[in-house]
Amino acid sequence: MQDPRNPRPPSGLAWRWAVIGLAVVGTAAAFGYAGGWLTPDRLGPKKIVDLLQANGGGAHPGYRRNHAKGICVGGRFEASGQLAPFSSAKLFGQGVSTPVVGRLAIPGGNPQAPDSSAPIRSFALRFDLPDGEQWRTGMNAMPVFPVSTPQAFYELNVATAPDPATGKPNPDKAKAFFGSHPETGAFLGWVKGAKPPASYVDETYLSLNAFYLRDANGQRHAVRWQVVPETPSTGDGGPAAGDTDYLAADLKKRLAAGPVKWHLQFVFANDGDPVDDAAKAWPADRKTVDAGTVTIDSWQDQADGPCRDVNYDPAILPKGMEISGDPIIVARSAAYAESYLRRTSEEGHLPGTKAVKEEQR
Ligand code: HEM
């Protein structure tokens, strides 16, 4: 029998069990931390997407949790060659033609929202380069983003959430948020006078976040980009009274008459321009290079079009392009993945899904 005053060291077997136990507890703690279970107040993609989803009137199965209402478009990007000295990405070589899968949309989580519900429209593009490389970008038609950080974006969406009593944001809460966030000044200055045209085709869409180009000599260049319509609008008097779906109708009409074109321009930062803050515009005189032409010649409903299952994650970039230190880029990447996971696991609810899946078998 063992003398209790003089315990024997644990056997080799007990040590092994202790090490295994520690490994299991450590792994569970790591999963718990990564999954946010140990830090429920930490701002992560789930918390952001839950809020966007609630502000959009709850889950709309199969739809994006932001920019839910939209339409797929298709076409090509033809490079001018003018950007090639600044980026080694293959799609910018002179005369290179790259297919694109695009999506035009309005912000908000409700796929049935009237087109006039937001003064902003968006254009997302996936460029399919040779050898499986891709560049994905989501751009908004506005000169600056309202806030500088993911935390402030979350708080903005809390402050402008629809009040259950009125269905509209509580003006006092919104005022308090904007009052305590002076970085929103540039956005507020724009939004007060914003008169968005009644057409997706007449808008200029901007990356807002800054990125880096990397040239063949390894030099880095800080840039933002924008797509600018080639032909200014002739104006058609805007939508008829009560028409809530005029943007897609206008697009279909325009494409029936022929392709529509935008110029993809890159704007270069000067030394000292903020590269990590999408709420700050750069002065208008910055060097701008026309990288080529985006031509859109087809559309498809998003329920069964090719853009439906694309995650326009802004961190997917080809060699020759890199993310900057802007904290919003990585937060977008994580939130889009969360939204993508939710909507793609619900796709059976969407019209056309069954047929598409059957065709692919
Ligand atoms: C922290 C800031 C932001 C968050 C959390 C956020 C969140 C989201 C989410 C969850 C989606 C739906 C994604 C999907 O299901 O595929 C989305 C779509 C989109 N966002 Fe953001 N966003 C942010 C900032 C921005 C900024 C700075 C831009 C700049 C242009 C932008 C442009 C877009 C566009 C264009 C789409 C639609 C993409 C498509 O058509 O599929 N977002 N956003």
Image: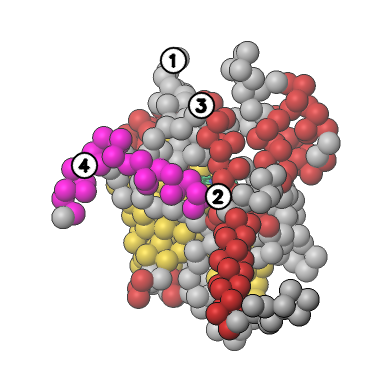
Query: Which amino acid type is shown beneath numbered disc 1?
Result: Gly
The numbered dot on residue 57 is 3
Residue 344 included in the magenta stretch of the image: yes
Q: How far is disc 3 from disc 1 in space, using C-alphas?
A: 22 Å
Element marked by disc 3: loop
Camera-nearest residue between 155 and 306: 155
Quadrant for the C terminus in the image: bottom left
Q: Which residues are magenta?
A: 336-360
Q: Residue at x 64, y 77 (%)?
A: 1
Residue 179 included in the magenta stretch of the image: no
Query: Which amino acid type is shown beneath numbered disc 2?
Result: Ala
Read off the residue under disc 1: 242
- Earlier-in-chain disc, 2 versus 3: 3
Where 89 sits versus 297, above or below? below
Pointer 2 local density, CA inside 10 Å: few below 14, some 14–19, many at least 20? many
Read off the residue under disc 2: 335
> Picture coordinates of residue 41 (x, y %)?
70, 44
